[in-house]
Amino acid sequence: MTDLLLSRVKADDLSRLGTDDYVVNMGPQHPATHGVLRLVVKLDGETVKQTTPVLGYLHRSIEKICENRTYPQCITYTDRVDYVSAMSVNLAFALAAERLMGIEAPARAQWLRMIFVELQRLASHLLWMGAFGGDLGALTPFLYGLRERERILDLFEMTCGQRLTYNYIRIGGVMIDILPEFVPRCRSFLDYFEPKVDEYEDLLTYNPIFLERTKGVGVLTAEEGINCGVSGPSLRGSGVPCDVRKQQPYLFYDQVKFNEPLEQGGDCWSRYKVRMNEMRESVSIIRQCLDKLEPGPFEAKMPPILKAPPASEFYSRIESSRGEMGIYLVGDGTPKPWKAKFRCASFNNLYVLDALTRGWKVADIMAVLGSFDMIVPEVDR
Amino acid sequence: MVSLAANIIGFVTDILHALYAMVGLSFWAAQLDIVVVVVVMFGFTSVFVMFLVWMERKVSARMQSRLGPNRVGPFGLLQTMADAIKLTIKEDVQPVHRDKIPYFIAPIVAFVATFMGLVVIPFDKGMVVQDLNIGILYVIAITSFTVIAILTAGWSSNNKFALLGGFRSSAQIISYEVPLVLSLVPIIMTTGTLSLNGIVLYQQQHGTWFIIPQIVAFFIFITSATAEANRAPFDIPEAESELIGGFHTEYSGVKFAMFFLGEYVAIIVSSAVAATLFLGGWLPLPFLAFLHLPGFVWFMLKLLFIIFIVMSFRWTFPRLRVDQLMDFGWKVLIPIAILNILATGFILLLMAKGA
Amino acid sequence: MNKFLNYFPGILKGLWNLFVGLSVTVRTMFRKTNTQQYPEERPEMPVRSRSMIKLIYDGEKDQFNCVACMMCAKACPNSCIKLEGVRMPDGKRRMTTFKLDFSTCIFCGYCVEACGFDALTFVSNEYENTVYKRGSLLQDEQAMKWVRPAHLAPKTEETEPAAVPAAQGAPQ
């Protein structure tokens, strides 16, 4: 509306019109910013002119703390880096430390790790789906997602005892072997869950209101995404095949068959669809892993005190639920790492928020933020 | 055959007139009757609103695979009572630089104006407070009062965001008034009367309810009614995950409760109008007429059915953005409503020519 | 032109998808709910649930199993455990005081894993551990004392999970 008026005003009059833009805080406490993220939004009426994220409200100096803890003790801190997807971060750290120390986890441990990381991916995507729906106003998918997530967390609790911060994937293998009833319970859960994804799609995907809110909103081109360091489902929604599981397979991902869901739109809807398809792929991966599980030790033989060789370094990358999770470990011959740097997907994904929301309305900030599946503990560490 | 409702009304009227005679106020009998009816109406609606709040919580809970309130009272029925008591004893926080009189009046207008719409709804044959022969016009005019309440609330709060929320909300309500009225025009054209009772009698005469020939109008009406009441999926002004709080940001305690309950009364009025116009009011379901239930019961069942539909909209659909909301109202609902009017007019002409 | 031609089919398709969405929520209304009414229906905690850490007290020998080897204190990432021991006249070590600060404990389980003397364990049924004062979370050995019921197997058999019975916890 203002554009129509402004176009009739001569260019030199524009400076004298002088509409003020006002700066609004989508403050650290906000139902939709997925945690304590502060967005300073400069608005012109209803249109966004600039979005500046202010970080640090959840900074717990995990990287600094890890410099003063032994390698196994660091694993307990990695749980808290991304508490929605804790198994993935455990795994990244364990892979980095194993590489530094020259330990190889036995086959059964690798298969178990794969099962748990994929189950964790399902749990994380279910929570994302709920939060995304909630941002847009559909409050019901949140409850449905949590209902399924409870079953996954029950599986986790049965195995390692915790529902959120597992400390399960250790250096050299896993903490403890699964119980015999895990496999049938997991299979029955997968059979129950697979049609549910279709149900959630029924509720949201082609809903005209949902389409209006997400189609064409927040379009990220492939080039922009690659240049800005976006990774994971957010980049696959723009058509770039960037799955770390395919490019640099870790664990036994080269021995299981799965597709990499890609969408070409680059908008919020494409990113949403990629994640829904990823849930289906995860189900298929878990089934294949359960079939290929062989008996054996769940932990490698390791020295009682784990030391990395002096002046050693390694960067391990895995595909976490949000994108590429990387841990750069530097060892110095002592039982404690010299430096552990966490490269978290959400931190890099957050960068493009400003560019994607300029010129759009306030309500679209929510849609874009939700579609990137941004988790603040990952951003702030 | 005189209906049960008429029997009860006659009986109660006799008792009341006897009471007036005892007190010596027989001269004012007619006016006192109206006062009694209004008080009964008010009481009934208040209780019904409390029931509706409970129903919303239960329905939303069941849709989300959980139980609703079930601790306060049997099946949680007294939950709304507990919430009402909580809101009443809350501290009334008021902004210092507010506009005092409009701030005080706005919730009252929101609450009371919507009640007045119930005056013309026929709950049973002859059971209507006042069967105005401009029934529909009256209802639509009365529901427009909420715009005044919202604008007043937004303005007097002395809050930039509440004002903007008030503007958005009133723009939404005004733009959805048009399809609301336009969707009712074909019915008025067909029946030739504005009186709600008359429309029900027309449906009785012709045996079909208006939902069958006017299904398009039914959908338009339900959608516009939810938009009028600021309910999801049109609840941008009062959504929690939005930036701007909405016109009722600066209200707390009883004043907030009045806005909240006023919204429910608006739902009741719109659903009652929909039940009367499209679903035949107090007429029984054709194939279940042998049950001989009083017309009042049929009316309440239909009312609850439509309210259930309105509630399930809220918990299933995401929210529309403000400009998309306006687009939808002006570019989709109004053209379809106009096309509906044209089509109905055309068919009426054909039928008249043929007869 | 495309938009013009798509007007009515678009509306009908949208309406159909709205109905499909409504059918999902209305269908869910008639299914069983997932609510567990908490104080009356308590959850059944799995055996390995890391609910509360307890010091095992041997009823027969009338002493704690702990020998104050300090392995748990070294293993703890947050240094929650402070304990002291004394060497008895017969050459064996025994623990005298054991303090675990539950306000900093993250229930990672390293202390339980590190203990080689079956002195520490997780008791899965004790998950209601809220207190009114933060100071009460610093528990000493008397508060953490737990006698293992006769029917439960000790820690060494946990590598064969089939031997572990259904519920490990203090008798209700």
Image (tube, coloured by chain):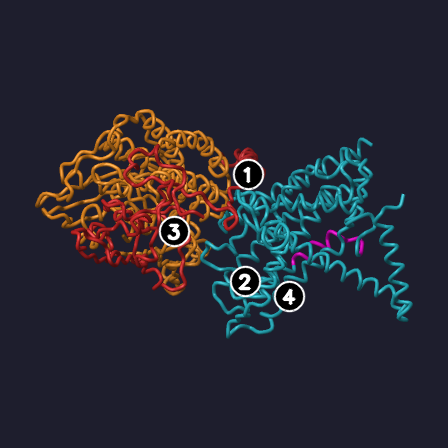
Badge 3 is on which residue? A34
Q: Are marks 4 and 3 on the same chain?
A: no
Residue B108, label in figure = 4
User: Over which residues does the magenta segment extend?
Assistant: B130-144
Q: Is A182 in the magenta?
A: no
Q: Three-letter amino acid code at disc 1?
A: Lys
Mark in front: 1 vs 3: 1
Considering the whole magenta stretch, tell me its main secondary structure: helix
Badge 1 is on which residue? C32
Query: Circle 1 sits in a helix, a strand or a loop, which is it?
Result: loop
Q: Do labels 4 and 2 share a chain?
A: yes
Kindly identify the residue that appears in the image at 60 percent across and 60 percent down. B82
Q: Three-letter amino acid code at disc 4?
A: Ile
Q: Which of C33 and C166 is in front in this view?
A: C166
Q: Do labels 2 and 3 share a chain?
A: no
Task: Compute the Cα span from label 2 to label 1.
Answer: 37 Å
Residue found at the very far left of the displayed protein:
A310
